[in-house]
Image: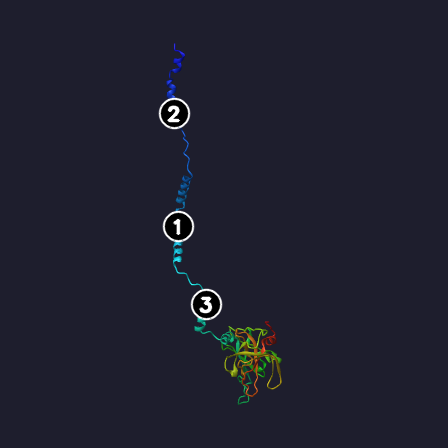
Amino acid sequence: MVNASEKTSRPRIGSAQQTVASSARPAANPPAPPIGRFARLRRLTARLSARYERFLLVALGMAAALALVAASQRMAPPAPGLDQKIIDAAVLRTLETATLPSPAAKAWEIIRPSVVRVRRIGPPKEGKDGQSGGEGEDIGVGSGVVIVESGLILTNLHVVEGATSIKVVFADGLVSDAEIVKTQPDQDLAILKARTLPDDLQAATMKSTADLRPGDTVIAAGFPFGIGPSVTSGVVSGLKREFRTPQGQQLLTNLIQFDAAVNPGSSGGPLITPDGEVIGIVTAVLNPTEQRVFVGIGFAVPIENAAGGAGMSPF
């Protein structure tokens, strides 16, 4: 018989072998080692680099180019600043070296397309057989200015008064018959309508005389003694002047007095500003002699009166 102590101390071979075997067998699903924060960042960076490799190359190239530009600008000498002294010196140098047109020249270029020669034609001469034929001769010449592109021309009434027919010569040389469509005897004004017009006819721009002052520069354009077109310049000598015609038959009032040279034939032409705007119609010259030549005082009807006579007022 085996006593209790022997039974207890005897090793159990089968159980020990099972224990060793079970401890030596690897686990079926061992837990993964923990991934560090930097390891995850490296993996994410690697994936992004692989996906956006081309974009990153372009961006790096652009950054390099910008860095080169910035470096070159830092190396270049700074540009001098533009202060008032430099600007003034440049303007003065331009004024000393450049030839600028005079105010009269600028004004003439503006008004030139609108100035016309007005010819007063007398009756045809009689032939040897007692019959008249052909066109009459010029018995007077004056000036005018186109105020409406449809062919309305302002001039003086005394320029066309007594004419058998009227002809106007435009800036481009076109000659046209014209007729009187309206008169304003108290201002010695007449409005003509040309029958034939140039293709590029330009009407003058009119300007109010409300701010006109003695001493202001004015330019007169017309055909003195039939010569021209001619241009003269001067200043306003006075306002609201009166003038009585040589025959004493008419008193003209509210006139502009000026000293730009005008002579017979200038009547009806425009008196203009340096900007080429019409402020009056040349009407008369004051002369104590019978020669009717200019002695320094001319008169013009303000354009407000002249435009009113035409049935229009741009002011």
Distance, label 1 to label 3, CA atoms, is 45 Å
Residue 50 position within the rendered picture, expressed as x and y whole percent measured from the top left: 39, 44
User: Who comes first in sequence, dot 1 or dot 3?
Assistant: 1
Element type at marker 3? Answer: helix
User: Who comes first in sequence, dot 1 or dot 2?
Assistant: 2
The kind of residue on which mark 2 rests is Ser
The kind of residue on which mark 3 rests is Lys
Tell me the quadrant of the picture where the N terminus can be found. Answer: top left
Residue under label 2, please give it: 23
User: Who comes first in sequence, dot 2 or dot 3?
Assistant: 2
Q: Is residue 5 visible?
A: yes
Choose top left, top right, bottom left or bottom right for residue 86: bottom left
Choose top left, top right, bottom left or bottom right for residue 30: top left
Element type at marker 2? Answer: helix
Q: Is residue 243 above or below residue 8?
A: below
Residue under label 3, please give it: 85
Residue sitting at x 39%, y 50%? 60
Q: Is residue 27 above or below residue 82?
A: above
The kind of residue on which mark 1 rests is Leu
Give 17 or 53, whichever is nearer the viewer. Answer: 17
Residue under label 1, please give it: 60
Q: Is residue 38 left or right of residue 241?
A: left
